[in-house]
Amino acid sequence: MLTGLAWLALEAKFLESAREFYEEQLGLTVSEHGADELAFAAGETDLVCRRPDDLPRGGLHTHFAFSIPEDEYDDWWDRLDDEYDLEEAQFGPARSLYLYDPDGNCVELGQQDVAGPGIDGIFEVVLEVESLERAREFYEDLGFETVDTGENRKRVRLHGPMALELWEPHLGIADARGGVHVDLGFETDDPSAALAAVRDRIGSLERETEAEIVVRDPDGHFLTFTAP
């Protein structure tokens, strides 16, 4: 049903600090620059940094993961280690490093099967939710598939256009937290079908046109269903 992650939006108090981090430290290209918003090209997904001047605001303390080619991992570690207090985690054969951006978002760079060079997509986003069961059922009805439940019963992992982790409030790897009021854009061939699948459980319907539908999920996250 949902075919791609079009964007992930974060709240940024100061756009210049966000630009320096994502452009200069992580090598992303600025694709749009407005008075209150910056967009960076991260593979086929836009990373948006937005001042909290209107709704949707963008996510606070959001944990998300960038894809990097496997053979670039050591270079990224050497590049960032002097300036940031990095942490590392191993997932099977793949390694990930963790650091924080200027607004307190936990940024993961993980080995993935991508071409690169450099950051080539966003492969995971973590949302904070009140009820795992309610949130899991909501996103399953949008076509996500549950693939893992945490041992502490505070998290669920689903696969869809990207990996979606749903966390009840707790601290994860590198003391990461799930994001609140996160703004996600999803590509879909049929926005109306996506809305129909969850209409009875959305928090609100913010906008509805033939090409784009914006809702809030039961935990207040903004979701946009947009035609490619």
Image (cartoon, rainbow, N blue to C red):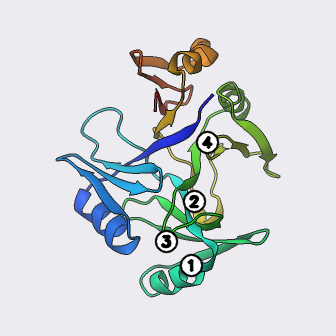
Measured in 3D between alpha carbons, the distance from the residue under mark 3 to the one under mark 4, in whole angstroms, is: 21 Å
SS at mark 4 in the image: loop
Please, what is the three-letter code of the amino acid marked with disc 4?
A: Pro
| Residue at point 58%, 36% (across, down) | 3
Residue underneath mark 3: 117
Measured in 3D between alpha carbons, the distance from the residue under mark 4 to the one under mark 1, in whole angstroms, is: 24 Å
Q: Earlier in the sequence, mark 4 or mark 2?
A: 4
Q: Residues within 10 Å of mark 1 (few under 14, many from 20)?
A: some
Please, what is the three-letter code of the amino acid marked with disc 2?
A: Ala
Q: Looking at this view, is 114 or 12 the one in front?
A: 114
Instruction: Give the tally of numbered discs.
Output: 4
Q: Earlier in the sequence, mark 3 or mark 1?
A: 1
In front: label 3 or label 1: 3
In front: label 1 or label 2: 1
Please, what is the three-letter code of the amino acid marked with disc 3?
A: Pro
SS at mark 3 in the image: loop
Say the numbered circle drawn on residue 161: 4
Measured in 3D between alpha carbons, the distance from the residue under mark 3 to the one under mark 1, in whole angstroms, is: 8 Å
Residue underneath mark 2: 176
| Residue at point 58%, 21% (across, down) | 194
Q: Position of residue 173 (x, y in %)?
A: 65, 64
Q: Position of residue 97 (x, y in %)?
A: 59, 72
Q: Position of residue 169 (x, y in %)?
A: 62, 46
Judged left or right of residue 72, residue 205 is left
Q: Residues within 10 Å of mark 3 (few under 14, many from 20)?
A: few
Q: Earlier in the sequence, mark 2 or mark 3?
A: 3
Please, what is the three-letter code of the amino acid marked with disc 1?
A: Glu
Judged left or right of residue 59, residue 164 is right
Q: Earlier in the sequence, mark 3 or mark 4?
A: 3
Residue underneath mark 1: 72
